[in-house]
Image (spheres, coloured by chain):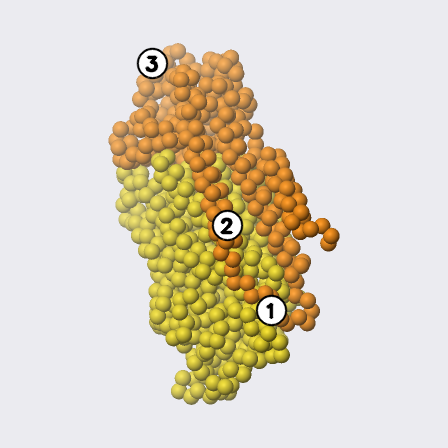
Amino acid sequence: MKIPSSILTLVIGIVLTLVSLWYGQNHGLVPVAASKDAQEVDNIFNLMMTIGTGLFLLIEGVLIYCVISFRRRKGDQTDGPAIEGNVPLEILWTAIPTVIVFILSVYSFEVYNNLGGLDPVASRNNAPSQVAMAGHHHMMALGIGPSIDAKGEGSPLRINVNGIQYAWIFTYPDTGIVSGELHVPVNRPVQLQMAAGDVIHAFWVPQLRLKQDVIPGRETTLGFTPNLIGTYPIICAELCGAYHGGMKSTFAVESAEDFEKWVQANAPAPAETADTEKVAVNTTTLSNEEYLAPYAKEMGISSDVLLSLHSEHQHQ
Amino acid sequence: MTTAEVTKTQPTPHHKERKLIDYFTFNTDHKVIGIQYLVVSFIFAAFGGSFAEVLRTELSTPNPDFVTPDLYNQFLTMHGTVMIFLWIVPAGAGFANYLIPLMIGAEDMAFPRLNAVAFWMFPIGGILLLMSFAVGAPQAGWTSYPPLSLMTGKWGQEIWILSLLGGGTSSILGAINFLTTILKMRMPDMDIHSMPLFCWAMLATSTLILLSTPVLAAALILLSFDLLAGTHFFNPTGGGDPVVYQHLFWFYSHPAVYIMILPFFGIISEVLPVHARKPIFGYRAIAYSSLAICFLGLIVWAHHMFTSGTPGWLRMFFMAATMLIAVPTGVKVFSWCATIWGGKLSLNSSMLFAIGFLSSFLIGGITGIMVASVPFDIHVHDTYFVVGHFHYVLFGGSVLGLFAGIYHWYPKMTGRMMNETLGRIHFILTFVGLNLTFMPMHELGLMGMNRRVALYDPQFQGLNQLSTIGAYMMGIAALPFALNFIMSVFNGEKAGRNPWRALTLEWQTSSPPIIENFEEAPILWAKPYDYGIDTEELEEESVSELLAEVSAESK
């Protein structure tokens, strides 16, 4: 080959960098991002894809080159060169990954902090017994708090989430709505207070890039501010039984007007309001049982499930 | 099997055939035990693999129409448990049993009877586990998180616990043996830095087993109480905490990942230099990185719980520790690449699998760094992205390393070569099949497909069908391997003592080695990877001739 090897290496390096940079931004492997935080998660993923693609091409390239160029010729029984190591090279390939993972750690820390993951209220661990005795304490939870950007944007919409085999139940304390679907207005911070009725579930909306286990005996929380109107799936991501795959619901991000309409259409009748408010204020999950009965049919919950749920909570 | 036999009382240079029956008995010969481990683990792998084919068949359509959802969860639990505890872990122990005494010039393991006890616990536990189908197999996943595991079939779950306790005990006994043997029974000339890298890998593996497996046992015993005696250690209805189980479980089960991969790192470090005819690049870096992985592997368990009941600071700590593991692992991958760079590669089946290992383990490593990042992991945790990631590590890594080891040491174990054509067919089908199966899973997970489901959104059907085709391909790949493995015992080409012209000690004795391994005390005339150093002297005579000469002189 007539091209000097240093130039060839340079060209390969540039091509590799360009391909990695392009693919890191254009992999098309994630669904639409429905919040600013989700966009931040995508940014870190894109960075990791860029580095990953570069590393992938480099190593696979070396392997393919080795297999082609350094194949043993027929009849050649001699050994290769006795190179036992190269300390500067080894220091280099120890140092570079160390720097890369350091950068990724710091960047991840920042993104996670922006998501609200280090929110002092949300990220505090607490003994389950306290929760069991205290019922719903909104100030004591585990998970992801409000997004850093969302602070000061007005009071978040609080929604209580109960995960049971195999459905999600959303209770809106402000309006008394109980629903099998999650409806929220666009651009308003949402804070979910989550509990599980039977086994561990996990609340996941891929478009928000957020997931949090919902654990019986503990309260967990998730905060986010959706900024894209649309309908997205809510998926249970923790094995919860035979019909785990069917434990799905809908997450609807609506304009303020549409959300208001939905609230109007779904708010409990005024006659029940007094009763409802009592439930909403004192939202220990066990008191939902009677209240949920009318909704049970449409959500596919049998009376057996509700009964077992009820009896389990009696133990607490 | 045709392992040669010499009775202890009557050592003769003419070796009788070892009787087949020896392999079905309580035998204390480390070579018999090693082969017992390997053969039994592959029999269990056939079960685990067929469970995987059931899962993939179910997933070729979005609806749960092939098996009932209950049965599907039984199969997914059993697939994971069998592949981990009855295939990869025991196969690693099999190689360790067979190779360690030979590599360090010892007659047997330090505690031969304990070794046989450890082995026999494994098939008994395995058969017990498979029999759980009779009472309804466990269906809470291989992680068996309570409260779900307390609510789905009491006896299936209890059998799962008992068989894991058996397997764990077996593993601990094995680890004690490996550590003692490596540290105390090396031949006098061999210091710890002239020991083959496989022994370093087993040093790290055994340490991990000893430190972490007892914690799993504790978790399982407490779970057993919850299950049978109605206690509430993990059951929230009585004030128990399911998250504590997760901590205890992963305190073992993350190191378990390294228990499953480190022995195969060791095998790759043995296979590459031999077939590339070059010294291993950076012996000490590879040896010490095993120890670094061992240490870091113990402090990263909660990265399996980033979306669980873990506070933010804990997530951050475990993220940083997990990211750090990429450094020693990267050192290994780069060193292996540098080992084959500029060598004279014989692209036989063993080498193909070893290079296949490098190529696919790399993908598992890259996605491993990605899932270490907490904000990203929160999105992909418990999705098919993670399924793709750990199959690249455990199949693309451990299993390809396992096959590389089988093709490499089969001549030593049986005295016969394996068929190269069948070996290459096996490699191509496996390699294409594994990428076809596991690559689409990354996209599936990112786009929103959760794991452990029998029914899924129809938009994911295309990629799932691709994955299913790949799984069938890997199933077919098992046939040429099984045929080759069985037939070569009888009609494989005779191997001779050192068909690969390798330098580690196991190649200095006959193939298969005699009962106490070496007729004469073996001679350490080179470091394990000194290829190319004596090329000028060796122009006329091959290494094996020299070896034969040396051993003749020493008689």
At x 37%, y 69%, the residue is B181
Element type at mark 3 = helix
Residue placed under numbered mark 2 in the picture: A92
Mark 3 surroundings within 10 Å by alpha-carbon count, few (fewer than 14), some (14 through 19), many (20 or more): few
Can you tell which chain is drawn yellow? B
Looking at the rendered structure, whether the residues under marks 3 and 1 are on a common chain is answered as yes
The three-letter code of the residue at mark 3 reads Ala
Q: Nearer the viewer, residue B333 or A271?
A: B333
Element type at mark 1 = loop
At x 40%, y 20%, the residue is A151
Mark 2 surroundings within 10 Å by alpha-carbon count, few (fewer than 14), some (14 through 19), many (20 or more): few
B322 shown above or below B525 = above
Residue placed under numbered mark 3 in the picture: A274
Q: Of the numbered discs in the image, which one, if any, rests on residue A79?
A: 1
Q: CA distance from mark 2 to mark 1?
A: 27 Å
Tell me the colour chain A is drawn in. Answer: orange
Q: Nearer the viewer, mark 2 or mark 1?
A: 2
Element type at mark 2 = helix
Query: How far across and how far down the image is residue A170, in percent?
Result: 42, 25
Which chain does the numbered disc 2 sit on? A
| Residue A178 visible from this viewpoint | no
